[in-house]
Image (spheres, rainbow, N blue to C red):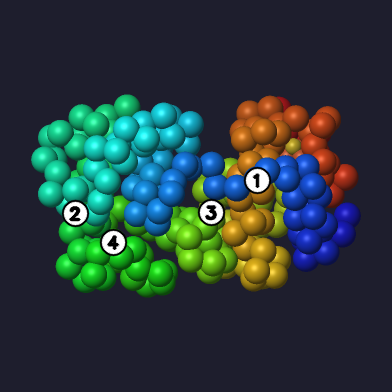
Amino acid sequence: MKSAEERAPEILKLLAKAYPDAKCELDYETPLQLLVATILSAQCTDVRVNQLTPELFKKYPTMKAFAESELPELEEDIRPTGFYRNKAKNIQRACLQMLANYQGEVPETMEELTQLAGIGRKSANVLLGNCFETPGVIVDTHVLRIAKRLGFSMQDNPEKLELELQKLVPQPAWTKFSTLITIHGRRCCFSRKPACDRCPVAHLCPSANKIG
Ligand code: SF4
C-alpha cells in the first residue's frame, strides 16, 4: 500500500466526490451562534443541538443577551444537550469575556479563541475554518478513530494528531479534509461496524474489512 502522504490527497478527492454536500453540520448564521452551538455540541449530537438552537437564538439574539441571562433559566433552555450546567456557565462566561475584551465580537485567532470559556482547539478550528476563512484540522472523535484506520497516525492525543494531519494535506484543505472525515465517520466508517463494502476509499485503507 502507498504511503500516508501519497494516499491522503487521493482520499481527500474521493471523499469530496462521495460527500459533495459536506459542511459543518451545526446550523448557524453568525460566528456567535456557531460558537454557542460548538459549546452545546460537546458530548451531544449535532442533530440534537440543531433542534434546540432556533428557539435559543430567538430568545437570546445577542451576545449581551447571553451574557446577562439568568443562569438557571439558560441551564433549563439548553438542558436537552446534556452537561447543561457547565455549558450554560461557559456560554455566559465566554460572552462576558468577548464583551469585555473584544468589543463584543468573536475573536478571529486560535490564541484568542482558546482563551474563551468552553472553547478548546477543536471548537476554535471549527470557528476559524467556517467563519473566518482560516483553515484548521478539526480533531473530533471520528477523526481520531478514522485517522488510525486509514493508517495516517496512531496518535490518541488530539493536539498531536492535529499536527500530524496538517502535514498530510495542503493547508487550504485542512477544514475540508477534517469535515469530510467526520461525515465519512457518520455515514460509513462507523465506530462499531464500518461499512467497508461500500466505502469509497476502501482500496486505500489498510483496515478495510478487518474491523468488527
Ligand atoms: S475501508 Fe472500512 S475502515 Fe477503512 S475507511 Fe472505509 S469504512 Fe473505514
- Which residue lies at the image location 70% right of the left edge and 70% below the top edge? 170
The answer to whether the residues at label 1 and label 4 have Cβ atoms under 8 Å apart is no
| Quarter-of-image position of residue 124 | bottom left
The location of residue 80, given as percent across then percent down, is: 32, 27
Q: CA distance from mark 4 to mark 3?
A: 19 Å
> Given this view, does label 2 or label 4 mark the residue nearer the observer?
2
N-term mark: 4 or 3 = 4
The answer to whether the residues at label 4 and label 3 have Cβ atoms under 8 Å apart is no
Regarding ligand 1, which quadrant of the image does it lie in?
top right
Residue with the mark numbered 4: 116
Amino acid type at image mark 4: Leu
Amino acid type at image mark 3: Val
> Given this view, does label 3 or label 1 mark the residue nearer the observer?
1
Q: CA distance from mark 2 to mark 3?
A: 30 Å
Q: Nearer the viewer, residue 25 or 30?
A: 30
Residue with the mark numbered 2: 64
Q: CA distance from mark 1 to mark 4?
A: 28 Å
